[in-house]
Amino acid sequence: MKRMNALIPARGGSKGIPKKNIKLLGPYPLIVYSIKACLDSKLIENIYVSTDDEEIATVAKQYGAQVPFIRPPEYAQDNSTDNEVLNHFFDHVDCEEIAFMRPTTPIRTSEQIDKCITEYYSSTRHKCTGIRSVHELPESPYKMYRIGGSGYCEGFFEHFEGEKNYTNLPRQRFPNAYHPNGYIDIIKRSQVRTRNTFGNKVLPFITEFSLEIDTQDQFDLLELYLQKAENDKNQ
């Protein structure tokens, strides 16, 4: 089976959790969980980290990743897009596709990584424009509200199957909904160059629920999860 390169994007300017990507989560800095999962994979060849931060670069190299360049500051802002980061990466590294591994989704297995890459290199590779990992949501978007300009709750959609008051319908009536979770995305160089990063034929790779870290509360919750897993292992 052909192997694939991995890219871990890790900027240094997190405001929600300062120095988030190298903050200790259990025994390791956050980014190291993604590096270790890639190292354990049989189908990941090179592990690259794209960062604007020298401290993150040092930690990444210490644990076995490559940092072939420092990302320019203009591609490491709060409003910087994946496409900007990916275009910059493909300008410096010659490969046709990468496994995009977000460090904010630290709990992965190498088996699932390899399963996704295997699926990509099957006959589906030339039919899809990319692969995104997703998990099923417990609630449909049809059950959610936004606060309208008048200050009242209102649905996001005009109707569901003709029903205007759809938020009161049983959840079983709605189609299953899935949330992209950053577990592993497979992205094509040719697609990135079009500025439509994933394209219009995106295959889902369905995983179990995967906690993403964007806030301190989520970080604390994941610490409790890891502590419980360690306690269960030692019992």
Image (cartoon, rainbow, N blue to C red):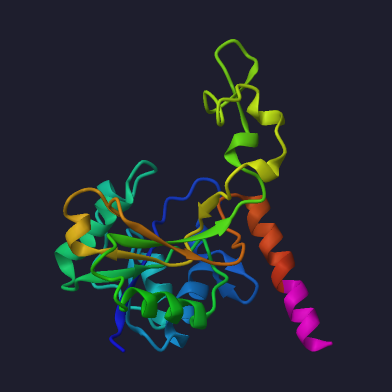
What is the magenta range? Answer: 227-235
**Which residue is at 37% across, 85% downward?**
43
**Percent position of residue 174, x then y:** 61, 42
**Percent position of residue 161, x then y:** 55, 31
- Closer to the camera in the image, 52 or 103: 103
Image-quadrant location for residue 88: bottom left
Q: Main secondary structure of the magenta part?
A: helix
Up-down: is 82 above or below 53? above
- Closer to the camera in the image, 106 or 220: 106
**Which residue is at 24% across, 54% downward?**
72
Magenta run includes residue 114: no
Up-down: is 96 above or below 175? below
Q: Is residue 53 left or right of residue 14?
A: left
Q: Quadrant of the N terminus?
A: bottom left
Magenta run includes residue 234: yes
Image-quadrant location for residue 150: top right
Q: Is residue 131 left or right of residue 91?
A: right
**Which residue is at 35% across, 45% downward?**
77
